[in-house]
Image: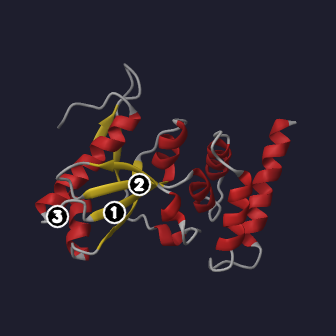
Amino acid sequence: MAQSPSSFTDAIYQLLGHFAAELTARGAPEHSVRAFIFGGCAVHLHVASRVSSDLDLDVTTAVLPRQALEEAKQATEYVLVQKSDGDEPDLLELDLTYSSVLGPLHEDFDTRATLVEQKPGSPLVVFLPAAEDLALSKLGRLSEADIADILTLMQSPDASWGLLEQLTQEAAKYYPAPAGDLTSKLAYVINHRRESVT
């Protein structure tokens, strides 16, 4: 087992490195696999406010067969993360069941994403969706943790509530939910934000 990473951010990139090695072992050429980070790890990379036990990746490739891609995910070793001295280490592993199609996602989210890793020789090219797209992806389930993540993401100076509202209205046109579901959930979050400020 490799040395434990010194931060949760390092742990995320170490796990991505393990995944890249498994892709390489299955014949994936350089920069042939695109991965978008979602979930708690994505929130952490934006605002360093939380940790997670799994890495949610939306992965696409036109080169590697789907079975080989799934085998690479399953073979990827976990990473041990020690939050502070004396704490028991936690596991960080790939979520084998994650799919971005289960939650609301704007059709153009990839155009706003930031490239965060593209190493020479590695098959993996990794992107981080914009804060607004991550916030939108959390409106589907809208648990207390999702609300906290949305509020935290949108506190970033670069985040725009106006853009989030626009993306939510556009995604609501094709997201399979009752009419008004996403926009009412966003209104709830905005109201929650106002109440917590006063």
Q: Residue at x 31, y 56 (%)?
A: 125
Mark 1 or 2 closer to N-term? Answer: 1
- Asked if the residue under mark 2 is in contact with the one under mark 1, i.e. CB atoms within 8 Å, the reply is yes
Sort mark 3 into few (<14), some (14-19) or many (20+) by Cα contacts within 10 Å: some
CA separation, marks 1 and 2? 8 Å
Instruction: Name the residue at the top extreme.
Output: 85
Q: Is residue 67 left or right of residue 99?
A: left
**Foreground of the two, 31 or 59:** 31
Q: Residue at x 27, y 75 (%)?
A: 62
**Foreground of the two, 189 or 127:** 127
Q: To which residue does mark 3 refer?
A: 29
Q: To which residue does mark 2 refer?
A: 127
**Foreground of the two, 56 or 120:** 120
CA separation, marks 3 and 1? 12 Å
- Residue 38 lies, in percent from the top left, at 47, 55
Q: To which residue does mark 1 refer?
A: 34
